[in-house]
Amino acid sequence: MKNIMLTCAAISLTIMMTAQSFNIGQTSVTFVDPARNNRNISTEIFYPSTTSGTNVPVAEGIFPVLSFGHGFLMNYDAYSIYWENLVPEGYIAAFPKTETGFSPDHQDFALDLAFVIQSMKAEGGNPASMFYQKVAAESSLMGHSMGGGCAYLAAATDTTITSVVSFAASVGTNPPALPVAAGLTLPSLIFSGQNDSVTPFYSNQLPLYQTLPSDCKTYISINGGAHCYFGNQNQICDLGELLSGSNPTISREEQHEVVFTFLSPWLDFILKGDN
């Protein structure tokens, strides 16, 4: 099997040397969804800023929103590689902190992921918000493992979302992700680790890629890659991977390098029109 299948013809993998680099700001927000009995969605947000810090001013510009779903028994702090790499490139990265326990509700988590994007767009139109006139119309759902599967469930609930990106996505969500994916035509980028035994590519990410009817979809299998290497070192995830029998043959840092070699220019094309 080929390691990379690219079907979105216009994508260029050339990283522009003139791209602006922003500082990283951080703020904690609790969004409230009135449609779900005023459900509280605690969210950590990282954004391009004038200076690094907490609640510092947002930088000049209009920035796409990335809503990132964590894996089972994990939280946002396992994924700092994403905000550290993508926020300086001009993205707002939001991490819902819900459904972190032993019995997560996948549908609720999916709705949280979508609601965070809706809420950030609303912030962009609110003169009292620090994000006023700073939020682009373009957005992407993202997620790892459980969060990757939930990203596809979320995409089915909001037709204004631009794209989906998943890392070692689990299709064993409730409801199952594959039937939902069969109705999605938005651009999608699917990463898998070849040596992942937690969510093996042949029963998870590859069927997901094959099921999506989108004419702009990309599947990337990383040689020797692992399940947990799509995030930072995390004891719970690493223990689960060890017990599952995964045997990565590359380092975590090498896997991260591959991810961002493809992820950054893909997002720039899909969300910023930069080819």
Image (cartoon, rainbow, N blue to C red):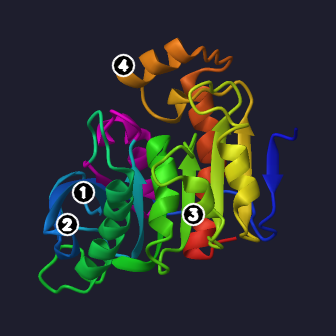
Q: Are marks 4 and 1 in contact (CB under 8 Å)?
A: no
Label 2 sits on a secondary structure element that is loop
Residue that protrudes farthest toward the right in the picture = 1
- The amino acid marked with disc number 2 is Pro
Q: In the depicted view, which residue is nearer to us: 222 or 151?
A: 151
Judge from the rendering whether residue 52 lies leftward or rightward of residue 204; answer left or right.
Answer: left
- The amino acid marked with disc number 4 is Gln
Residue appearing at x 68%, y 24% in the figure: 195
- The amino acid marked with disc number 1 is Thr
Rendered view: 247 above or below 192: above
Q: Position of residue 98 (x, y in %)?
A: 25, 49
**Mark 4 and mark 3: span between their CA atoms?**
31 Å
Q: Is residue 173 magenta?
A: no
User: How crowded is the residue under tag 4: few (<14 C-alpha within 10 Å), some, or many (20+)?
Assistant: few
| Residue, disc 4 | 235
Q: In the depicted view, which residue is nearer to us: 212 or 77?
A: 212
Looking at the image, is mark 1 or mark 2 earlier in the sequence?
1
Looking at the image, is mark 3 or mark 2 earlier in the sequence?
2
Q: Are marks 4 and 3 in contact (CB under 8 Å)?
A: no
Looking at the image, is mark 4 or mark 1 earlier in the sequence?
1
Q: Are marks 1 and 2 in contact (CB under 8 Å)?
A: yes
**Mark 1 and mark 2: span between their CA atoms?**
8 Å
| Residue, disc 3 | 180
| Residue, disc 1 | 51
Task: Name the front one of labels 1 and 3.
Answer: 3
- The amino acid marked with disc number 3 is Val
Q: In the depicted view, which residue is nearer to us: 237 or 101?
A: 101
